Amino acid sequence: VLVYEYPPSPDTSSSASNSVDAPNKATAAWRLLRNDPKMICMLPFNFAFGFAASFRGSFISREVVRIALDDKESAYIGVLSSVTAIVAAVMSLFFGRIAHKVGKGTILFIGALCFFLVAAPFALKPKISQWGWVGVCSVYILQGIGRSTYEGTLKAEFADFFAHEKEGAFANIVLMNGVSSALGYHLSINLPCTTPSKYCIEYSDGTLHNVLVFEILVMSTAILAIWGYWRAAVLFKHEIERGGTARVMGTEEEERPFTNSSYREEALT
């Protein structure tokens, strides 16, 4: 997928540093997650992407397409998946062009809203047989728009927020994506129900699954993603006002404000 390369933020480009030794790189993700409250605040957006992707893959592609489009041979899955990839590529370039005008926060809000709308329509209109091509394609398009904000804008914002430790920041993106996707696929087959209903769906293998819980999970993490990004942006602004990006991974001589537990708890409230 094409991803627009954002220029570094003028507030943080001078503070970026890659001069950490091998042991620090090996534990960078955990140390950053533990010491910098901004990383905790950014967790929901990463999980929203992972949950939305697993919801699309396990429920929409597997069951909705089969029933709504009468696609028992899964002939349309490749076409619909390519729609998501194409939309993600185009929107990544588009968002990259307008980011300096509307702000990265606005774009990430759009992405979180798209993840919310991947699941919300099925909570409001749970009868799969009533869905058609327009509705199903719309969901794949929304996933593509959300994916473009995750693969482009979010990573650019991570580079700004965590310019002091980019290795740990991007390692956390990979970690969060892996955990959320694995958890999402696990839940997709481990949320059983007993009686078929509009939210208790019988899959093609004859098993019953409670899709409403999964839908609520996707929607709630998308909402938390908006709050989390806003809170992380506030913390980042405070760091800049105090004279530069805080460094939590550097040498012993460097200031490490986030290692103070009382400050970290205050920052997250």
Image (spheres, grey):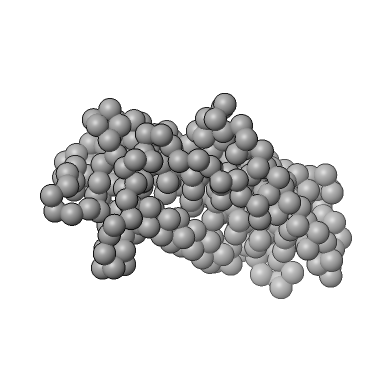
Residue 155 visible in the picture: yes
Q: Residue furthest right?
A: 70
Q: Residue 136: where, in percent of width, then height?
A: 77, 49
Vertically, is 158 above or below 23?
A: above
User: Which of 189 and 254 lies nearest the eye of the viewer?
Assistant: 254
Residue depicted at x 30% and y 53%: 32
Image-quadrant location for residue 114: top right
Residue depicted at x 28% and y 47%: 36
Vertically, is 231 above or below 71?
A: above
Q: Residue 169: where, in percent of width, then height?
A: 39, 53
Quadrant in which the C terminus appears: top left
Q: Residue 148: where, in percent of width, then height?
A: 62, 47
Vertically, is 173 above or below 141?
A: below
Q: Residue furthest bottom?
A: 205
Q: Residue furthest left?
A: 253
Residue depicted at x 71% and y 73%: 205
Number of marks in picture: 0
User: Which of 35 and 17 lies nearest the eye of the viewer?
Assistant: 17
User: Which of 254 and 178 lies nearest the eye of the viewer?
Assistant: 254
User: Which of 243 and 139 lies nearest the eye of the viewer?
Assistant: 243
Quadrant in which the N terminus appears: bottom right
Q: Is residue 88 left or right of residue 183?
A: right
Q: Is residue 166 left or right of residue 244?
A: right
Residue depicted at x 41% and y 34%: 10
Q: Is residue 202 left or right of residue 52?
A: right
Vertically, is 182 above or below 137?
A: below
Q: Residue 219: where, in percent of width, then height?
A: 55, 44
Residue 120 visible in the picture: no
